[in-house]
Image: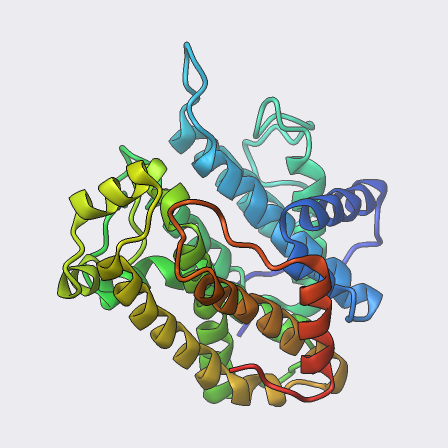
Amino acid sequence: MRESMLCDTDETDIVRLGYRRARALTAEHGRTYFAASCLLPPRQRRGVWALYGFARIVDDVVDDPPAAPMPPDKTAQIDRIEEALHSVLHPEPDGTPGAGLDHRPGRHEPGDPQIEPILAAVRDTVVQFDIPTATFDAFLRSMRMDVPGTAEFRDRYRTWAELAEYTYGSAAVIGLQMIPLLGVRAAGDDVADGAATLGEAFQLTNFLRDIAEDLDRDRIYLPTDELTAFGVDEDHLRRCRAERVTSPHLRRALAHMIAVNRDQYRRACPSITALPNRSRRSIAAAAAMYHGILREIEQADHNVMDHRVVVGGRRRAVLAAHAISGGRPW
């Protein structure tokens, strides 16, 4: 049974505007997602942009540094976005926004005029592809885990299992949202598990690449028990960051976690091959480009404390072409 009662509507100006703005956000901030989405048919491509655009807006609320002298209330911002999202996903029987909500542009997120059109594009995508709306609730829960003062707040994770509580909402559900969008009509448990695993693989790759940036925000998204096993505690991490060096102990810990991450990509492979042809090419290209970050980290001798490792545009194109032709880099 569907998790929400949604009614199809003709595409409106605000929906078209939402897709355009979501496209711009994806092109600017999600180069891998954008490149891979271009391999999809236009209808599916726009759905990827809408999902990414929404996630990006919420992520920016969570990650933006507080503005002096009066920092914004991030919890209240997320609450307003969630309220607005529920309003468009669960409208009144006559199709109007949920009761009690002023649906004028800018009402839900003052100062960010992108939210209303992008929410309209998200709803259009959810309706077209029958995406489970509970996935958005799981995503927002994980975003609250990043916000100090919330009941869900966490900035350290001791074990892989604890980290998985976060990555389920921040990444696994994104993979689950993509299943119907990619043309899989009756996904079995294996496909769903693989999609969730691939989403978490992308997330762990980001954590390995961005460890220094996250530490600057007073967050550690790598299991501290795993780091400790290699002689790396938080003080050790902070010394490495201050000196902009990656110690031998940290290099060994990162090499171990890269191996764990590669195993995630391997386990997701069967789900990629189960996709319809054009969708398979797109997701294989995205996986290859993301996996390429791991190779760049290794080629930099795991030096992630000095600079942010990136995969150049030409290299991404080579990796994508290799994956599309049937090759696998892991």
Which of 252 and 223 lies nearest the eye of the viewer? 252
Observer-nearest residue: 114 or 234?
A: 234
Q: Who is closer to the viewer here, 200 or 41?
A: 200
Describe residue 269's horizontal placement relative to residue 284 as left or right. left
Give the residue drawn at x 30%, y 72%. Answer: 256
Image location of residue 329, percent across then percent down: 57, 81
Image coordinates of residue 65 in percent, x first then y, are 43, 28
Hey, which quadrant is residue 116 in on the image? top right
Q: Can residue 62 be seen in this snapshot? A: yes
What is the quadrant of residue 104 in the picture? top right
Q: Position of residue 181 (x, y in %)?
A: 67, 70
Q: Is residue 69 above or below residue 308?
A: above
User: Would residue 251 appear left or right of 158 to someone viewing this image?
Assistant: right
Give the tally of numbered discs: 0
Residue lying farthest to the top in this orientation = 69
Q: Residue at x 44, y 75 (%)?
A: 197
Query: Is 116 located above or below residue 175 in the figure?
Result: above
Using residue 141 as the reference point, say whether residue 11 is left or right of it. right
Visible in this render: residue 282? no
| Rendered residue at 63%/28% (across/down) | 112
Q: How is the image coloured?
A: rainbow
Q: Name the residue: 60% across, 59% down.
A: 311
